[in-house]
Image (cartoon, coloured by chain):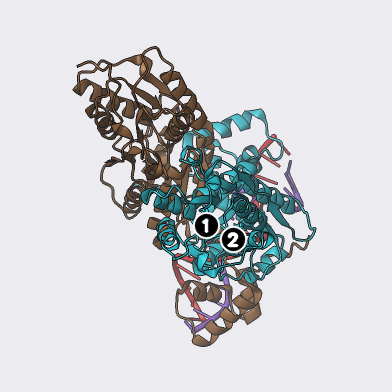
Chain colours: A cyan, B brown, C red, D purple
Amino acid sequence: MAANRRPTLADVAREVGVSAKTVSRVLNEDGPVSTQTREQVLAAVAKLGFQPNLMARNIRVGGPDTTIGLVIPDLGNPFFGAVARSIEDTVRERGLTLLMGSSADDPDRERALTDKFLARRVSILMVVPSVGADHSHLKPHRAAGLPVVFLDRPGVGLATDSVVSSNRDGAQEGVAHLIAHGHRRIGFIGDLPTKLHTRRERLAGYRAALQEADIPYDRALITNAHDQHGAAAATSHLLGLPEPPTALFAGNNMVALGIVAQLSRSRRKDVAFVAFDDVPLAEALEPALTVVAQDPEEIGRAAADTALARLDGDRTRARTITIPTRLIVRGSGERPAAAKQEA
Amino acid sequence: MAANRRPTLADVAREVGVSAKTVSRVLNEDGPVSTQTREQVLAAVAKLGFQPNLMARNIRVGGPDTTIGLVIPDLGNPFFGAVARSIEDTVRERGLTLLMGSSADDPDRERALTDKFLARRVSILMVVPSVGADHSHLKPHRAAGLPVVFLDRPGVGLATDSVVSSNRDGAQEGVAHLIAHGHRRIGFIGDLPTKLHTRRERLAGYRAALQEADIPYDRALITNAHDQHGAAAATSHLLGLPEPPTALFAGNNMVALGIVAQLSRSRRKDVAFVAFDDVPLAEALEPALTVVAQDPEEIGRAAADTALARLDGDRTRARTITIPTRLIVRGSGERPAAAKQEA
DNA sequence: CTGAAAGCGCTAACAA
DNA sequence: TTGTTAGCGCTTTCAG
């Protein structure tokens, strides 16, 4: 229990025989200090192992803390990991540190996290909104100048900046790719819960592609899955249908992993496949996986840039930034459709 | 510039017509408060949108902040993402929030981050040590009761808890698997920089396996790579050798991705392959990828449990916890060795 | 160039 | 059950 108190500014001051304010001046390169005392102070700081208490400083200065609060669904999901890295890279030179937490897509956990972040007086708040979450409680904070940015999905109850992928267009392009290769029965495995913005948008893109090609929409071909395991089950289900699809479209990276695994296990090389969001080793699969790639780096950078601009006084109206996706054709979308396709 | 000051405890108190301390009591469920005033206070809190300033509270209470500082090499690496998730899951119920930053394996950045975390008075500090970093500056903090845990690698200059994988044994097991299938020339592609603890340990395991089988160690078969791209180049290099290896061993997940990609591009199905650390879709590759799997969940949990025990007063001596790895045989290690193998 | 006093938002300790 | 005073560690303000 050697809980010896950590040294304070006063301790350093006493050590040198100056006032606390002088030490403060040295440390913050505030007012003028003689080289003489500066050296002494620095020496004492080193000797005592003094670390200024940032919380005390912030309290006094009154400004926000130099942190940026980030709420994502899952710290372990590589997509959000990549977004977080990009945010950090962008804000680092401004001296901001990341305060992170995962919501597990639960509105209550999301609220608990944002409340904690607000209590810490973060400089910026970024949230991947959970389904069912309402964000009107953030209104006064935004009004008071706190930059709030929604990531990956729009928020509810608060008009603020958001950064999303071109979900609808991207999905449409991916499905059109399958259609161009002769497929007319295309299974869709989207996110769960089905109310998820990304699930809706990507399904809309799917439908748009069908419509464009005059292919009727068959509800039986639409399923959803929350994780890799569920996606594998959904794949089995779809392929076991009386009139099974000849191609599959994955609504996100986790679903893609599940589909690939299941197709591999069941040795179904005849099923064409396009995934939304890229996955590692996509190019090493056989056939290589064609994807609609998102751009997590750009999403993170755009979010951070927008937030920093707000911090710098940008008071223009809230904007939604859409980051383009990119169809990467690698082969899996080109497996021939079954012979029974109609003209 | 509507920078209207955020409401304080005093504002709430004034609104209700009570003292600040009474509001404080309500919010912290401290001393007794009449139901009457409690209601009024709560109403005022809601009306004003008051959020207690956690920094001010911490200053006064004197204790550490309810955060846990975590320094990892790269927020985008799924392995560390999984570790972070596990840590968060373990500490959540204690009310601790994650403060994260990536060091890019640069000692200076690592130091900058730990200093920031210390200045914030984190409750716990967890670090994946960079090569070349010295941690003796943490000594007084640890002595003062701050739990410090090293992750994935041991730290330098500070005796404290650390949690690592069974790198040596795991690598030995993986390489022995290749040897058991007839391979005698096995290429090793490890981490960069070569001083990395994991690189050394895993190479030691590689050598132990060779020795066990009386296979001479050939330095020409040892390379290293920092990322996927470098690993692909190293693969080409090894396979272009006058006496090329018939099997490869990957020193980490990123290297594994690079090797798989390169073998795929060059259509080299004849090369056997085992990787340290699992990767997504390993089972869907052809052949499926045999790996020495790490257990990031368990690493995170062990680290968090240890740190929490320290926080609760555990003063036993520093321990190193080794989390076992597990050989997952999926096929890629079993490709037959080239015919020219000697007895 | 340096110091003393006051105060940031909150809570511990002691009254009332 | 409630209020008052003091002070956490730091910086601002104003004097020396």
Q: Can you give x and y, in whole percent of width and height, for residue A271 in the image?
A: 48, 51
Element type where label 1 sits in the image? loop
In the image, B312 versus B328, the foreground residue is B328
Q: Residue at x 35, y 15 (%)?
A: B219
Extreme-bottom residue of the structure = B36
Residue B138 appears left or right of A221: left
- Chain of the residue under the numbered disc 2 shown in the image: A
Q: Nearer the viewer, residue B288 or A87?
A: B288
Residue shown at 46%/57% (left/top)?
Answer: B66
Q: Amino acid at mark 2?
A: Thr
| Image quadrant where one finds the N terminus of chain B | bottom right
Q: Which one is closest to the eye, mark 2 or mark 1?
A: 1
Residue B170: horizontal and vertical position, in percent?
28, 35
In this rendering, the answer to whether B209 lies above or below A110 is above
Q: Residues within 10 Å of mark 1 (few under 14, many from 20)?
A: few
Q: CA distance from mark 2 to mark 1?
A: 33 Å
In the rendered structure, find residue A340 and report the number of the disc placed on it.
1
| Marks 2 and 1 share the same chain | yes
Q: Residue furthest top?
A: B242
Element marked by disc 2: helix
Mark number displayed over residue A198: 2
Which image quarter holds the C terminus of chain B? top left
State which quadrant residue A34 falls in.
top right
Circle 1 marks a residue in which chain? A
How far from the left and from the top, in percent, is residue A114?
56, 63
Q: Position of residue B11 (x, y in %)?
A: 65, 72
Give the quadrant of residue A129.
Answer: bottom right
